[in-house]
Image: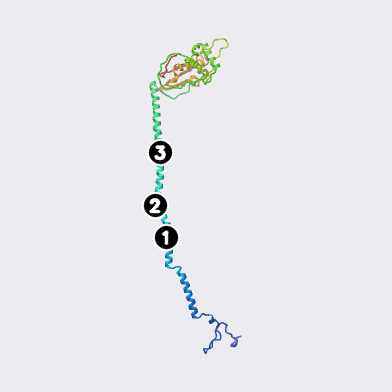
Amino acid sequence: EDVDDESTLQPPPSVMTSNYDGGEDEEAPVHDQLPTPEEYKAKMDQHSAGHSAAFAQFSPSKVAAELSEAGSVVGDVHDQLPTVDEYKSSKTFEGGKKSRAGLYTFLLLFLATAIITAVTVPLVLKEEEKQESQANQSGFVQGDGSSGSSGSSSTSGTGGSSTSSSGGSTSGPATNTNVNRSRYQKTIDYLVDIGISTREELEDPSSPQYQAADWIANVDEYQIALPVEVDNGSDLIPHTPFTERYALAVFYYATFGNSWKYGLKFMEAVDHCEWFMDFITTSGSMVRMGVAQCETPSGFEDNLVHKLVMPNNGLAGSI
């Protein structure tokens, strides 16, 4: 239901009411809250002063001063850093030092190699020329050494004289340091009993017989067995591997074997049938020097010396 009674309508408390005839308002609560012109102007002046102070912090002069100070610090740091040219120069210098160090090391190694080669090559060539000259003088060129024939020991005590010249040497057998009196005395008695040497020769320290008997009894590591007397009362057999080895030792000492051009394996601790070396002549044929051949004669059980070859080997003395 619509209500038109104006007496029931009330204006809101904050709305100003006025008379149409221009009378004063009965109440004006909103207007009373607005500042007066003087208050508004004072407040605006305060805000303007605050903004001016704030903008003053970012004035161009102050900002320029701060930037200038920061620039000086950056400039100092930049001044401490190398330039591009300086950096390239330092890298080039470091690379140059490494390159020079490697070059110096290579030169030192090359120089050491050259010195060693210059010293050793002439010595080797000189030794080869010496050996070739000796071989040419004797008419032989040494070939591959070969092992000797098989079989037990043997030695033929053939005599004969030899002439000598100086030449390559072969060291003699070791000296006696541990005398086996029992074996030595048996050796002396055996050699005297079979008549191959006299007791005077075997007791004379300067004789080749004495040196050979001492060597075969006390020094020779091969230690060939002494023959024994046959039980049926027959005489001792004079031609045995023991007497052959003794005779070859006498031959060695009597002809100054330590001064032979080629040692030919004499006095080594092997079967004396292996005391030889093979040589190739200038015509291409092979010649065996030393104990050139061993064989077993009819009626014997042992392999005995059959041929002794000593051409142009620098022998001296007599037996």
Which is more N-terminal, label 2 or label 3?
Answer: 2
Depth-wise, is mark 1 or mark 3 nearer the camera? Answer: 1
Q: Is residue 112 above or below residue 194?
A: below
For label 1, the crowd category at 10 Å Cα-Cα, with few meaning under 14, some 14 to 19 and many 20 or more, is few
Q: Position of residue 84 (x, y in %)?
A: 39, 53
| Disc 1: which residue | 72
| Disc 3: which residue | 108
Which is more N-terminal, label 2 or label 1?
Answer: 1
Q: Position of residue 219 (x, y in %)?
A: 51, 20
Q: Amino acid at mark 3?
A: Leu
Q: Is residue 22 above or below residue 217?
A: below
Circles 1 and 2, Cβ within 8 Å, touching? The answer is no
Q: Which labelled disc corresponds to residue 86?
A: 2
Secondary structure under the numbered disc 2 in the rendered image: helix
Q: Amino acid at mark 1?
A: Ser
In the picture, the quarter occupied by the N terminus is: bottom right
Which is more N-terminal, label 3 or label 1?
Answer: 1
Secondary structure under the numbered disc 3 in the rendered image: helix
Kindly tell me whether residue 156 is visible in this rendering. Answer: no
| Viewer-closest of 268 and 189 | 189
In the picture, the quarter occupied by the C terminus is: top left
Please tell me which residue is depicted at 48% across the width and 77% down the height of the picture: 42
Secondary structure under the numbered disc 1 in the rendered image: helix
Q: Position of residue 239 (x, y in %)?
A: 51, 13
